[in-house]
Image (cartoon, coloured by chain):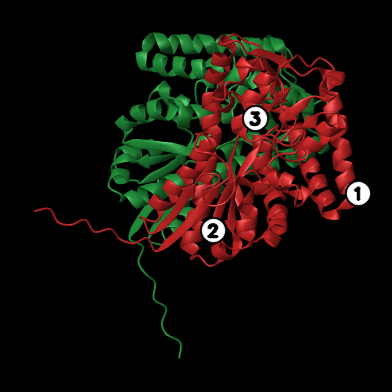
Chain colours: A red, B green
Amino acid sequence: GIAPAVHAQAAVRWRMASSFPKSLPTIYGSAEKFSDTVKALSGGKFEVSVHAAGDLVPAFGVVDALQQNTLEMAQTASYYFTGKDPIFAFGCAVPFGLTARHMDAWMEHGNGRKYMDAFFAQFNITSMSAGNTGTQMGGWYRKEIKTAADLKGLKMRMGGGLFGEAMAKLGVVAQNMPAGEVYQALEKGTLDATEFVGPFDDERLGFQKVAPFYYYPGWWEGGAELEFFINKKAFEALSAENKAIIRAAGAVAARDMTAKYDAQNPAALKRLVASGTKLKPFSKELMDAGYKASMEVFAAHEAKSPEFKKIHQDMRAFQRDQVLWSKFSEWRYDGYIGGVKL
Amino acid sequence: GIAPAVHAQAAVRWRMASSFPKSLPTIYGSAEKFSDTVKALSGGKFEVSVHAAGDLVPAFGVVDALQQNTLEMAQTASYYFTGKDPIFAFGCAVPFGLTARHMDAWMEHGNGRKYMDAFFAQFNITSMSAGNTGTQMGGWYRKEIKTAADLKGLKMRMGGGLFGEAMAKLGVVAQNMPAGEVYQALEKGTLDATEFVGPFDDERLGFQKVAPFYYYPGWWEGGAELEFFINKKAFEALSAENKAIIRAAGAVAARDMTAKYDAQNPAALKRLVASGTKLKPFSKELMDAGYKASMEVFAAHEAKSPEFKKIHQDMRAFQRDQVLWSKFSEWRYDGYIGGVKL
């Protein structure tokens, strides 16, 4: 006969609540990659189960759950929590902020992670990247947006962060609704526009059928980092080996997600255009209007919070250096590569 | 009394030979980060000792050592071995090739790693990234290089890969010499130029004193990936847990190295300029001459090797898609960010 299977108990079992649904194979896939890697690295002695948005806690309830010590990990976008404190935005993306590589450099070898983790500590959180989406698209619009005047009164569904505050200054009216209702609202015209991520994620939502104008670039998300938020108390109670496992599995998941987005977005963009999507660049006037509104938003938060100001100014100084160096290296190279027949 | 310390023996001990010296804290630091991570992830049961170029085997002897099964791992630049087969170049960088993010995407979610590991198998190697330098500089020159005619007869020290073949077509005379002799040769004028990496690595070599013209961009290294080469037989003999540890430690080291380069290069560039370095862009004529020569090199290798052609064409198709998507996302965003006062 066959011997009964003997399954060793995992010595440590954690739960991760994602703020995202399983229908996003890029972002949710990063959480699954993390979980698989923790299990493999520990020989099955450490398991982190992944739960889709709403399964354990609501999508936007993950910070509360970590703070109340009822959850070990979350996968989320830090800027969802700017209602608690606008500083949360710097963990994910701010208008005209860092691109993916610049963000990694600021986080890992600048002051980024150090400052953010000092801030997150009050919420019982230590953080790490879950991957970067890269520069996002500027969203789907039922009508062309030619001038800043076209934004006034526009009913738009938007993600979190400081971007909404900048858009409000431009006259955009934020509409909150579950993702599942957006398509119908655009079709009926009770919604004029929505922004989401980029071609690969957006394609499956079918927006091109009801809001065919697809603008670029998403100036509010030049490089949005998704985060793993870790219960700080639970993390500190881990063995040195398990701490290293968490950090390394984060690096595996983060590298994988960015590469997956980059690999999948081009074909999705081509399919979208083939099915009727009209690609449009935001005009210089619109970019300038967004920039001016955004800088007013930053100035207002800086005036209220020295900590916000410290982190924002540090990020901008880092960004200025990155821009300087990029102009002599990658951007110059990109400019040539973009102009030749490969 | 104090109890005698008991040190558990590491269950697995490997040796990694680097092709680089300890004096490069970015690249060599990636090998050390890898080693530290393996030890931490295994709770000390798996150790990979790191050895600088020449300590165990010569810098360019690492592939032979892996093939002869006398070494478990190496850290190197794959393009050093184009003398064995030009296909080695695709593991690191080829002229007008992929940038760092595009390379990661091709390697991890395109056909890159799959094709390269199928090729490397004949050398008893399985590979993974050890990090990417980003777009490199175009090197140090004693005199200005204004036209393609200025390259004719230029005595230049160059790294490996297909770039040397393209430069030879332009009349550049390759000079092989140990890194330690380059400064003096430039000073004496027996060498006219040298290329290395970028500001952070180059600064410590002091070239600005003897070859002050620092050109950009390095069209032969738009995003050079350093590699960990792993002894395939030794890897396959590892437990599933130790295999996962090797892969995850690679991801940790690779993410760290790229971020470290990006974080350190801007300040080094500013210091170099402050100490007399004259930054110069390669002219359109020079870029076009490099491009034309490079495409001739690729065509010649394609005519000789169907496998070279398969990998090159796959990489170019992937690159065309990445360029397309980048134009609607990051490059558009970069163009705006580069033009505003941050």
Badge 2 or badge 1: first in the primary sequence: 2
Vertical placement of residue B153 versus A4, above or below? above
Looking at the rendered structure, whether the residues under marks 3 and 2 are on a common chain is answered as yes
Dot 3 or dot 2: first in sequence order is 2
Q: CA distance from mark 2 to mark 1?
A: 35 Å
Instruction: Give x and y (percent) for residue A167.
Output: 81, 31
Q: Residues within 10 Å of mark 2 (few under 14, many from 20)?
A: many
On the same chain: label 2 and label 1?
yes
Say which element carries label 2.
loop
Contact between labelled residues 2 and 3, with CB atoms less than 8 Å apart: no
Residue B135 visible in the snapshot: no
Q: Sort mark 1 into few (<14), some (14-19) or many (20+) by Cα contacts within 10 Å.
A: few
Disc 3 to disc 2, C-alpha distance: 28 Å
Q: What is the three-letter code of the residue carrying label 1?
A: Ala
Q: Residue at x 41, y 14 (%)?
A: B309
- Numbered disc 1: what chain? A
Q: Which mark is residue A303?
A: 1
Disc 1 secondary structure class: helix
The residue furthest left is A1
The subunit letter for the residue under badge 2 reads: A
Whether residue B86 is situated above or below residue A244 in the rendered picture: above
Q: CA distance from mark 3 to mark 1?
A: 30 Å
Label 3 belongs to which residue? A196
Q: Quadrant of residue A340?
A: top right
Q: Nearer the viewer, residue B275 or B73?
A: B73
> What mark, if any, has residue A72 been given in the picture?
2
